[in-house]
Amino acid sequence: MLCYSKDGLYTSLTTLPSEALQTEALKLFKSCQLFINVPVEAASVDYHVSLAQTALQVCLVHPELQSEIYCQLMKQTSCRPPQKYSLVQCWQLLALCAPLFLPQHHFLWYVKQQLQRHADPRNETGQYATYCQRAVERTLQTGEREARPSRMEVVSILLRNPFHHSLPFSIPVHFANGTYQVVGFDGSSTVDEFLQRLNQEAGMRTSSHSGFALFTDDPSGRDLEHCLQGSVKICDAISKWEQALKELHSGKSEGGSRVVKLIYKNRLYFRSQVKGETERERLLLASQASGEIVAGRFPVNKELALEMAALMAQVEYGDLERPVLPGPGVTPPAKAQHLLQQVLDRFYPRRYRHGAPPEQLRHLADQLTTKWAALQGCSSSECVRIYLTVARKWPFFGAKLFAAQPAELSSKENAPVWIAVNEDGVSILDHNTMQVHVTYPYASVMTFGGYRDDFMLVIRSIPDQGSGRSHIEKLIFRMAAPKIAEVTFIVASYMNHCSTAVSPPTNPPAACQPWELDARHFFASVPRAAKGPTLL
């Protein structure tokens, strides 16, 4: 009963509570046999991917079968099957099981004994058994999974021996400045564990200090990002993203080439943590602020926008080679023109370029050339320091802005606004000038979140001195559904932080005078660079 068999089972190896599960157990063994008895080839690996995912999905849906599949695989690894590849592939399927779930306690004892008996670093099957030992211990430590293995996970186990890698999987994590960092993980790694490794390799503080968080892109291809909670398993997040992509494409091949994109960027910003910032954090914060400027979610006038674009050009490309200064009859070479256009596309606000005539765009490129050339010799870190010094003069630096429309009857009051969320509270900004209409500290927020198809904010005002009564105000905003979820989670995160913070929050931005960052702030407040001619 417990030795390898090339024939099918007549009955399950474990006691199951229903005939339906008995039937599923026999089907499960057939799936395992198909997986084991057809040799894995890189060109047709999707055959084995589909078999593994289907079999393990059945076990996730019917937990009663989890002990059963372990017993079936233990049976097929006991005594040597006719083909060597069959034994190896049986161990590979077991290696895919171990991070997902474990058998019941008395079966777990049996599995551990079998793994101990077969573990041997001197041969291939023994190496897989050793890997399975590690995977079982990790699952006992971090808990079981929620989703079947993704294609990436299955292919990695099938095409490279996980024993030879301390972390069998790896994936690039993308940053706001266009760079990325490849990070390793195993089948049980949580987001928190993943971020700990990422922060060490990228030179950043913990997420609780830096405010950075891990996001995935949206399977639909829309311009949306989804924040991953710390307790989530990375492999589960990848698998669920992959399943959502398949459902969206209904099995069509268009989505087959896409893989999940992980993004690491600032989500919560705390002024008290500025002093401890690492150089990498400052660079990524500047890049993220630049993206907000380009998208029109940061108040800069045209002159300062060019100054900021020149700083980012110096950070990204270094000194402008043989700058062609504008003048009568002087035309920059095609390569230089292309580079200047690239800088404007990446770092200059779209709203200032949209619909501009060619002559105006050429004049803009000439101005950029002058300002960029003035930064000759200025280091990347110095440019980032200047950039952040200027950008942080806006009281809402680091806040997350959401376009919304008040659901009011009056057309005048129905103009679009920005909802700005930061550590001090929720603020309503004018959509055009970004001046503050009102700020609601978190202490006055009674409830918030989705209300039918809108975002609702219920505010309790300060009690009236005469009557001692407070006024309750319910604000409704029209927003896209994904943005409603995003703003709700960010408000909740800040409120949770406020409730655990030792020191009280600083004065809210509502107390500040409305302004727009302009070149006067740039020139008046930033010290000169230590080396070479600069803008200042």
Image: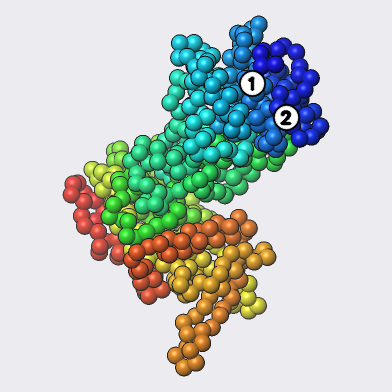
Q: Is 259 in front, or is 442?
A: 442
Residue beneath label 1, please? 73
Name the side, left or right, on which 174 lies relative to 99: left
To which quarter of the image does residue 110 belong?
top right
Which residue: 29% across, 41% down? 319
| Quadrant where the image shows the N terminus | top right
Mark 2 near mark 1, Cβ–Cβ under 8 Å?
no
Which residue: 61% across, 28% down? 107
Give the residue type at disc 1.
Answer: Leu
Give the number of marks.
2
Q: Residues within 10 Å of mark 2 (few under 14, many from 20)?
A: few
- Would residue 53 be visible to someone looking at this image? no
The percent coordinates of residue 366 (x first, y second) are 36, 49
Q: Is 388 in front, or is 106?
A: 106
Q: Is 243 in front, or is 148?
A: 148
Q: Secondary structure at mark 2?
A: loop
Name the side, left or right, on which 392 lies relative to 477: left
What's the mark number on residue 146? none
The percent coordinates of residue 273 (x first, y second) are 32, 56
Mark 2 or 1 closer to N-term? 2
Give the residue type at disc 2.
Answer: Thr
The percent coordinates of residue 466 (x first, y second) are 46, 93
Of circles 2 and 1, which is in front? Answer: 2
